[in-house]
Amino acid sequence: MVKANVLWVDDEIDLLRIQILYLEEKGHDVSTANNGDDALDMIQENNYDIIFLDENMPGISGLDVLVEIKKLKPNIPVVMVTKNEEEDIMDEAIGSKIDDYLIKPVNPKQIILSIKKNVYNKRLITEKTTSKYQTEFNKISSDISKASSVEDWYNLYQDLVYWELELDKTQENTMDEVLTTQKDDANQEFSKFIKNNYINWFKEDTENKPNMPFDFFRKKVIPLLDKKEKIFVIVIDNLRLDQWKAMEPIINNHMITEEEEMWMSMLPTATQYARNALFAGLTPLEISKRHPELWLNDEDEGGKNNFEETLLEHLLHRYRRKIKFNYNKVLNNKSGHRVNDQFSNLLQDQLSVVVYNFVDILSHARTDTKMIRELANDDAAYRDLTITWFEHSPLLELIRKISKENIKTFIVTDHGSKNVTNPVKVIGDRHTTTNLRYKHGRNLGYNKKLVFELTEPHKAGLPVSNISSSYIFTYNQDFFAYPNNYNHYVKYYKNTFQHGGISLEEMLIPCIKLKPKNN
């Protein structure tokens, strides 16, 4: 065991000689102080791994010393040692960010256990987590090679995300490369699965087709509306499963996860297609035929998601549901606070829908802004930046407000995103789409082995602007680059988060049902 540098503060320090000798015999360095003033001086001048602090001392009390310690060295674990078992004392200590507490008289083994918990905890967790992942590695590899159904891929991706988050908590990155390689292997096999099965899911007689965005309101929302329940739907654009799992503990402080499902986004995994499909309850091809005035093709001028409220209105009318609903789109904090300020008015309607675009905005900002790119230089940092936003966002405040009402809430998304690193050359004319993960147009030039091509887009529910138009999609970490100005293009877009193509991160999306914690 690595030794710890311990400070023990107690006005009766001489009576703790046995415990101190025991710690020193175990290899720990122990410094002592018999009052708070001396202790604070020592903490300023030295670095300690852990501090044992007597609660009841003459002069500056232990609780007051604790407050000062947290100002000076907030990351040092402090263990309160006390004779007092009064609940209010413990509440005050915990409220002052104490890390642990012991009731006198303490024995040496209690002290050792506290050191292990508070000093070696991360190291022990690292060793245990790494060992567990190493044990699971072969099973996951086997699952990748055997995955043959949508459900197999849902379970496999959830396993990969679980281990990604667990390893992210550890102090070491020794297994990061191994996990990254395993995710790449999974994405390669998943790409083959999509290539072999995707078009079949759009045939009317196909069994076991996955839930897709255009199924959401019909399958999840309308049945609850028919029961006269009030529903909130929060659509977070471009939300990945790992981002949701990182957000979930924060949300669970206010609302309980009643149901978590994995759904399949649709190709292209882009907002114009997947989110319009979500609100319309139709494929993009069906939208373009039923409501041509509400659909814009890639090359058309104008916003591609300006008609979501109207599409939802048509959906409810199509299913003969006379439901009063409101729709709100949040593009910045100001509009988010405006929604929160109007919360009592929203409650007048049976259905409330709020679209949050921040994660998508963050993804694009990371591409265009050097500082954001440096802050979110990999998946873990991108996830952390998302959580930092969420913890200080109007969205969390909205969730707090909803949690106080008897309202069922869904958190859904339209697609995820993928960190792209590998350029694939493509040739297109001036009408070809600019998206890096898919191309739609005529006269496309590409290597057929490197892309998933849809030469008959209508078979996958996609409209075309010209009878000879087709779609092509990149796999895994690939992104399209034009041969002209190739090096500049690649340098600018390499290691950016994009969406529109085929990967686990883009296509397998969470669909969450929450209920208020107090109910």
Image: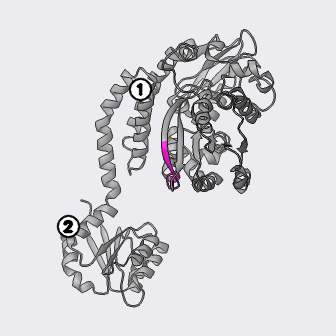
Residue 485 in the image, given as x and y percentages of width and height: 69, 26
Residue at x 72%, y 57% (from the top left corner): 341
Magenta span of residues: 250-258
Quarter of the view holding residue 189: top left
Instruction: Please say which color scheme the image uses.
Output: one colour
In the image, is residue 416 above or below residue 250?
above
Mark 1: which secondary structure? helix
Q: Is residue 416 visible?
A: no
- Using residue 440 as the reference point, say whether residue 72 is left or right of it: left
- Whether residue 2 appears in magenta in the rendering, the answer is no
Q: Amino acid at mark 1?
A: Asp
In the image, is residue 196 above or below residue 9?
above
**Residue at the outermost bottom position:** 59
Residue 198 in the image, given as x and y percentages of width and height: 54, 18
| Residue labelled with disc 1 | 152
Report, in whole angstroms, how far the alpha carbon at label 1 lies from the one at label 2.
49 Å
- Using residue 65 as the reference point, say whether residue 470 is left or right of it: right
Pick whichever of labels 1 and 2 is earlier in the sequence: 2
| Residue labelled with disc 2 | 26
Q: Which mark is residue 5?
A: none
Residue at x 66%, y 24% (from the top left corner): 282
- Using residue 279 as the reference point, say whether residue 108 is left or right of it: left
Residue 266 in the image, given as x and y percentages of width and height: 59, 25
- Using residue 378 as the reference point, say whether residue 337 is left or right of it: right
Towards the viewer: 32 or 452: 452
Towards the viewer: 84 or 420: 84
Mark 2: which secondary structure? loop
Q: Dot 1, how many residues are within 10 Å of its Cα: few (below 14), some (14-19), or many (20+)? A: few
Residue 250 in the image, given as x and y percentages of width and height: 51, 53
Towards the viewer: 150 or 317: 317
